[in-house]
Amino acid sequence: MTKATALPNDLAAYWMPFTANRAFKKSPRLVVGAKDMHYFTADGRKLLDGAAGMWCANAGHNRDPIVAAIQAQAARLDYAPAFQFGHPPAFELASRIADLAPADLNHVFFTNSGSEAVDTALKIALAYFNVRGEAGRTRLIGRERGYHGVGFGGISVGGIVNNRRFFGTMLTGVDHLPTTYDREHQAFTKGEPEWGAHLADELERIVGLHGAGTIAAVIVEPMAGSTGVLATPKGYLQRLRAICDKHGILLILDEVITGFGRLGFAFAAERYGIVPDMITFAKGVTNGAVPMGGVLVREPIHDAFMTGPEHAIELFHGYTYSAHPLACAAGLATLNLYRDEDLFARARKLEPVWADAIMSLKGLPNVLDIRTVGLTAGIDLAAKPDGVGKRGMAALDEAFHKRDTMIRAVGDTLALTPPLIISEAEIDDLAGRVATVIRAVA
């Protein structure tokens, strides 16, 4: 027996992701069960989930149809090779997802996470221009304060400094648009800010610097969640789409967070009335029950690869667990729940109720800004004099240990993203608990 396993439930061996490991292990936030709107702790406490796990349990936790589907699939087919072989649920799920997407986003390439989905989309963009005879289009453009996962492609186009600065130069040939957030012009906004559409025109400056013939793709989030819930301004995505069309640049919408109802539609592209060239998704596609991600691809991009010999591989890319049978089963059951309970429309209906409840926290101690869009909210708290992020971490601990509430903290920003099944009474309850937390860490 090793030192790491000498004690029951020893915490030393697990190096936790995106976590202050030493602080966590002094005062662990451990959950042992979940159902619908709640998590459960070992000591029997019931936690109201204000974060949908991590933006993913859109239909609530441990929903019986999803559990049953995973169990049945595991008993029938545990694994099928993703290369050169297939299984029926993979094709069924791809068709169901494509049916939800706008216009001719008709093809799905499955991955196992949002990070893999982003790297896949970037590779498809580069390969697309290669097969079209435009191999000089290699530049990729992201946005400051953007989050696109943790693969080298994703952190290269991403714009969160701590996610980038430890890992060297990353991919070359990457530029960034400016962030769309400006507190001076946008503070305490419900929905999309009025100010900021003009920031899309920065793409023209980058084109002028490098030449359109060098740029493959632009990738942005319709709502930047991991950096603090930043909605794109009114008209911004439409202008970005127009500039990309003008210069033959592909537009990728990263909908890992916004997909499957978070902003009231199957995909946020529908909310904003645009058709991107690719959409990345993950999280809500299986309600978080089994890891899965993917890329929706428009018809002309897919078809550009289908011109060589029929016996030849068209795209040299994929993952051992692409379209894993258990993930496909979970995905199909999840889509059925979204449809049968009309959860996307439910999110649209609840959006103004949610916005009013969260905006009621304005004026509490140290609240600098509040932003809401769809069923999401970001609450910026003033940093403590002795360290950025300490107030946010104190709020996380206060919520979990003393207020029986699960929230997310991004530095000193509190992020609220509840399951779409939340009731109006639970919205008021969650807002009240968060208010108590904010006062407690003042």
Image (tube, rainbow, N blue to C red):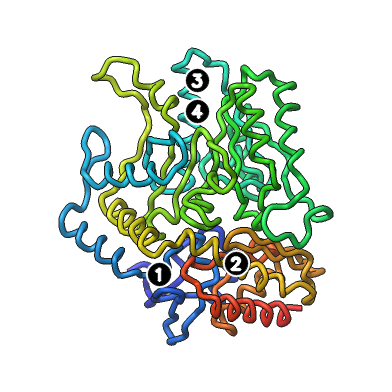
* Amino acid type for the residue under numbered disc 4: Ala
Distance of label 1 from label 4 (alpha carbons): 35 Å
Q: Position of residue 437 (x, y in %)?
A: 67, 79
In terms of depth relative to the viewer, which is nearer, 363 or 80?
363
Q: Residue at x 25, y 61 (%)?
A: 69
Distance of label 2 from label 1 (alpha carbons): 16 Å
The residue under label 1 is 61
Q: Is residue 378 left or right of residue 316?
A: right
* Amino acid type for the residue under numbered disc 3: Phe
Quarter location, residue 396: bottom right
The relative height of residue 409 versus residue 162 in the rendered view (above or below) is below
Q: Secondary structure at mark 4?
A: helix
Q: Residue at x 37, y 58 (%)?
A: 339
Dot 4 and dot 2 residues touching (CB under 8 Å): no
- First in sequence: mark 1 vs mark 4: 1
The residue under label 4 is 125
The residue under label 3 is 129
Q: Residues within 10 Å of mark 4 (few under 14, many from 20)?
A: many
